[in-house]
Amino acid sequence: MPITPPDPALETAARERLAGLATPAGALGRLGDLGVRLSAMLGSVPPPALTDVRLVVLAGDHGVAAHGVSAYPAAVTPAMVRSLLAGSAGVSALARAHDVHVRVLDLGVDDDLDGVPAEVSAHKVRRGSGAIHLEDALTAEEVRRALEVGRTVAAEEVAAGAQVLISGDLGIGNTTPAAALVAAALGLPAEEVVGRGTGVDDAGLARKTEVVAQALRRVGDRTADPLETLAALASADLAATTGFVLAAARAGVPVVLDGLMSVACALTAVRIDPGVADWLVAGHRSTEPAQSLALEKLGLEPLLDLDLRLGEGSGAVAAVPLLRSAVGLLRDVALLSDLLPG
């Protein structure tokens, strides 16, 4: 069943409302355009107040982390899961500031996470993933399970009242498989997509580039199939994020994308179903080259460009005030026709 796009009649009505506001023509710039898009996505003109925004951070480890592609050890991943649960991570502070609900789930952390609430690991697919330059990240069955988890989690958040969803990531080494996903989708060589991730030095960047190049050579023309690409080059958390984005779009709920990981997964979701693209908003531009390349392919202009590379959904959460501003302008600014005598 194809994904239903936002109602074009609502978009037209929102565009007419924007033109009728008591502001100079074009004065609201991209905020006005965003308000128009959100009116159509949220299903009314003027749009409803944006009161329920939900972030789901999907965590996992990556076999490539043992091969010199990150400035930090894999042991950081379980520590950061605990930090998120304690509300002390970077995105936690932003979420509190902007009234965003946060949920973190372990899809593939290479740790038992002793003492962590059971629901965090209830959907776990496996511990870690294969090192993609040497072996597939996942089996076909693990891809299926991860996609289904993503769909289930998105459905749960929508049922809980989410008006907007944000996909967040957590996992040392994750920019390597994400860059490989973008390279596979766009037919680009490793040197065009690989960035410094957590801040690797020149030698680390060279190692990371060679890992992605070797992975692409190993996989060959299997990259023509997005599901094969997920098995060969992704991880449980990235495959689940792909399912999360797909399910949100099918439910008619906009997704605000964060950095490279969520954008790589959104690009993969669009390969599976092109209708996904109509429900995406780019929260920010990260410092990773693959993210900008993927955004260009998706036709998305990021709301923020702050040189962020934290991950966790932080750039998308930082953009939430802009979404609320756009909605508020379309809702609350007077119409010029109401101000002028008839």
Image (cartoon, grey):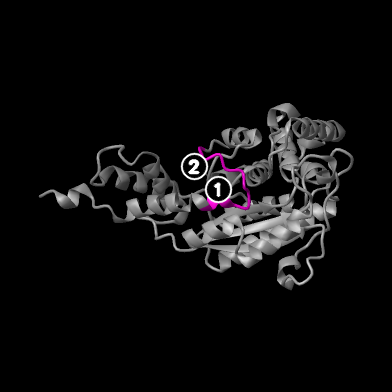
Up-down relation of residue 101 to residue 271 (above or below): below
Q: Residue at x 74, y 34 (%)?
A: 184
Residue 307 appears in which quarter of the rendering?
top right
Q: Nearer the viewer, residue 303 or 157?
A: 303
Q: Main secondary structure of the magenta part?
A: loop
Number of numbered discs: 2
Where is residue 52? Give x, y as percent.
49, 63
The x, y position of residue 79, in whole percent, is: 73, 60
Asked whether 314 falls inside the magenta stretch, the response is: yes
Residue in the image at 57% along x and 54% along y: 166
Q: Residue at x 41, y 52 (%)?
A: 39
From which residue to which does the magenta span run? 301-317
Name the one closer to the observer, 302 or 139.
302
Residue position marked by numbered label 2 in the rendering: 304
The label number, if any, that marks residue 200 in the structure image? none
Precedes in sequence: disc 1 or disc 2: 2
Mark 1 is surrounded, within 10 Å at the Cα level, by few (under 14), some (14 to 19) or many (20 or more) other residues, namely many
Q: Is residue 277 above or below residue 213?
A: below
Callout 1–callout 2 Cβ contact below 8 Å: yes
Tell me which amino acid carries mark 2. Answer: Leu
x and y percent of residue 139 in the render?
86, 50
Label annotation for residue 315: 1
Q: Is residue 294 magenta?
A: no
Indicate the quadrant where residue 145 lies.
bottom right
